Amino acid sequence: MSRAVWAVLEEGSRVEKLQKGLCTNSSIPEILQSPPEEVISSDHKWILGNKQLTTLRQASGKAISGPESKEGVIASGCEERGGKLFSGQRRLGGGGFPEGRAGRGNGATHEGRAVSALELRWVDLQSFRNNKRHHTQEMGLTRLIVRRGQHFSLQLGFNRPFQPQTDHITFVAETGPEPSEPLGTRATFALTQTQHGNAWSASDFTMDSSSLQVSLFTPANAVIGPYTINIEISQGQGPGVTYLLGTFILLFNPWSAEDDVYLPSEILLEEYVMRDYGFVYKGHESFITSWAWNYGQFEEDIIDICFEILNKNLYFLKNPSKDCSQRSDAVYVCRVVSAMINSNDDCGVLQGNWGEDYSQGVSPLEWTGSVAILRQWSATGGQPVKYGQCWVFASVMCTVMRCLGVPTRVVSNFHSAHNMDGNLTIDTYYDRNAEILPTQKQDKVWNFHVWNECWMIRKDLPPGYNGWQVLDPTPQQTSSGLFCCGPASVKAIREGDVHLAYDTPFVYAEVNADEVIWLLRDGQAREVLAHDASSIGKEISTKMVGSDQRQDITSSYKYPEGSPEERSVSLKASRKMLGPKMASSSLLDLLGSGRLEDQPVQLHLQLPRAPVWGQDVLLVLNVRRVRGRAHLWGPLRLRVRFCAQALLHGGRARQPLWRQSVPLNLGFREEIQWPLLLPYNSYKNRLTDEKLIRVSGIAEVEETGRFMLVLKDLSLEPPHLSIEVSERAEVGRTLRIRIILTNTLTVALTSCTVVLEGSGLLKGQIAHDLGTLLVGHTIRILMDLSPIRAGPRQLQVLISSKEVKEIKGYKDIFVATASAN
């Protein structure tokens, strides 16, 4: 027999009839004159609340309009406006439901007296209390957001006291488009007094008059996602009545020891789940710069966007039910997110651009946080946001994973290899004039590369590989047919266990490949200028816990260079990755021929002072004779040819912007220091936005005909800005910010703009045009903010101009709770 719940909501003269979420305009007399067939009860309950007049009637039989209600599916009597449920019952903690009235036809008897059927009148999801206990209060307190493997409570109000002997209550929780108990996307569980094991349960209930306080438990391996929760109430053997209690969102729980993402440290949880800002480390291993980033994972709409991302992945589009069922697995979810942050295969969040034309979007250097990117992607219906590079991809993924409850951090690897052919060797080519030459090979060395680490148990691997796992959303190569990477166990990378899933050989090469630099003559690689087994994978960095300082985590990826452990791991990984190819390497043949013996001269380029954009750059070449029996004892004549080229982030170089040739005569045991000047006019308007220059020198020894290489990468510093906060920050109280920038360059900064961002301090971004900042002039910007949330916050400031894209600064601000006054 079908069942339905009816509601009539009156606002002024307008009356709405709702059945199973379907609304038709009508009037009260029309509805009351058209009762369902076989009406069991026509009782009405009128309640005045929220300026609405509500009546609900429980009937059985044929519905007046719309499809018949089915078993287990609620015929809802609630009205939804703007995403909120309205009802006669006062809404508490985000839980709301209209008063319900069930039929009496199946009432039980007690000592010869008829007992009315138990009817649900109201429900309180207690979002305020539950969200605080589940560490989701930063996401808001008006809707229920909980973590799996942990109890949460709700309160049910009835028309009479609950009688455990005769009243039967069954809960049904569902997620996904086609909920199914075998797939784990539907759970049915009866109300009991005690919980049994790691399973869905409703227990530990307490009765107070006509209300019932119930503790619900979700298993630690439950599917994450948005849920609806219903109850069915029945007496004896009679049919039940189903009510919609509401909705909630279920997340991973790194606080639960039973969850695969469990992290047993409150300090680490605060940093890797709750912290909504951080740093990305960029530049070069010799001059690492920190870049403040607003993750903003607790902004009110970000959690919905995260599940929107999951619902647009290719696996979901192909088989929604199966995809949802696999969202209990942190490995699977991380892998899906890694693929969805880039847009190479799908409607992912970001479109990569490693060229120099960003006119159709935003330069990767001009993003200061993830929130604007995610909101733009969602608002455009899933159109990829233009543009991203590795640090943008990784930072956005950090936002998504922390929001979903997976401990995550952003990691930078300096001098990072991109080894496409898996031979553990990255080849670079120069001509005799010291110019970097283009190559058809896809292998490259990034000056830095950024990825993520997520913390989880790896049940799919042998014991010992739990903990931090590398995930890389930057589209570099495919994995199982999609542009994603990981999770690859950091422990497996360190131990050279490259046979373990996922993509471990690729990540191992990023931090361990050899770099070989060749001299190209007549289109052929004629001579090895340098072979460096330790230059790849330098200064692997992440934000230090509880600090703004950088932490070097290189030792977690590899043993010290040259140590017995490092050599053993290298041999093991090389055998697994190269196999039979290992014994027939042209490079190994060359290394064994004696042609890379020590050179009679050592060359080194130094910077006497930090290079600044807009000024001439001074370098010093140090040349020193090397003692040795195999070397010539007489004077040596050298010609050193220098070339400077702008470097792109992906390792490619622009055409030369400066050349110089220096003849040197070097006596035995003599040392020479030769100054070199790279004028500003030589690199003005010829650099990329990264302001990175490589100065290369190739020295030819006339007596031997041999060549030597010397390199120096320069990162030109932009002007520095300062941020001042002179007063105590408090929620809801105006906070004045002062931003100061002096143009210390030799050219004016034109078309200047300033962008402010900071979760908890302001909503979205604030942007202003500043015009032109002349040479030597100072601009002072005053802005008033009204902090929104208490706790540690960070304000990010970006001033961009036509000449310099990234003048960045940040200010840590602690916001106090609103005072009683």
Image (cartoon, rainbow, N blue to C red):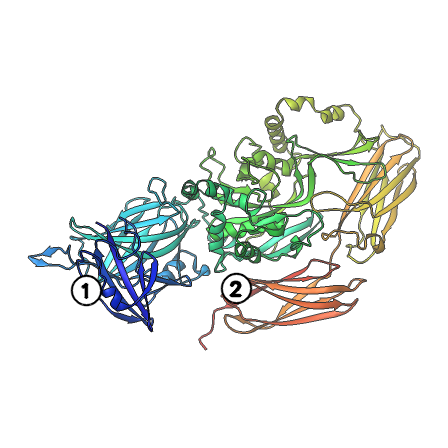
Is 380 on the left or on the right of 128, as rendered? right
**Amino acid on which the number 2 mark rests in the picture:** Gly
For label 2, the crowd category at 10 Å Cα-Cα, with few meaning under 14, some 14 to 19 and many 20 or more, is many
**Disc 1 packing (10 Å; few <14; some 14–19; many ≥20):** some
In this rendering, the answer to whether 147 lies above or below 817 is: above
**Label drawn at residue 90:** none
Residue 554, image x, y percentages: 61, 43
Residue 54's spot in the image, x, y percent?
28, 67
Which of discs 1 and 2 lies nearer the camera? The answer is 1
| Residue found at the far bottom of this picture | 821
* Rendered residue at 29%/60% (across/down): 155
* Nearer the observer, 538 or 301: 301
Q: Distance between the residues labelled 1 and 2?
A: 49 Å
- x%, y% of residue 4? 25, 55
Quadrant hosting residue 806: bottom right
Q: Name the residue under label 2.
A: 760
Element under label 1? loop
Dividing the picture into quadrants, the one containing residue 208 is: bottom left
Specify whether residue 711 is in view: yes
* Amino acid bearing label 1: Asp
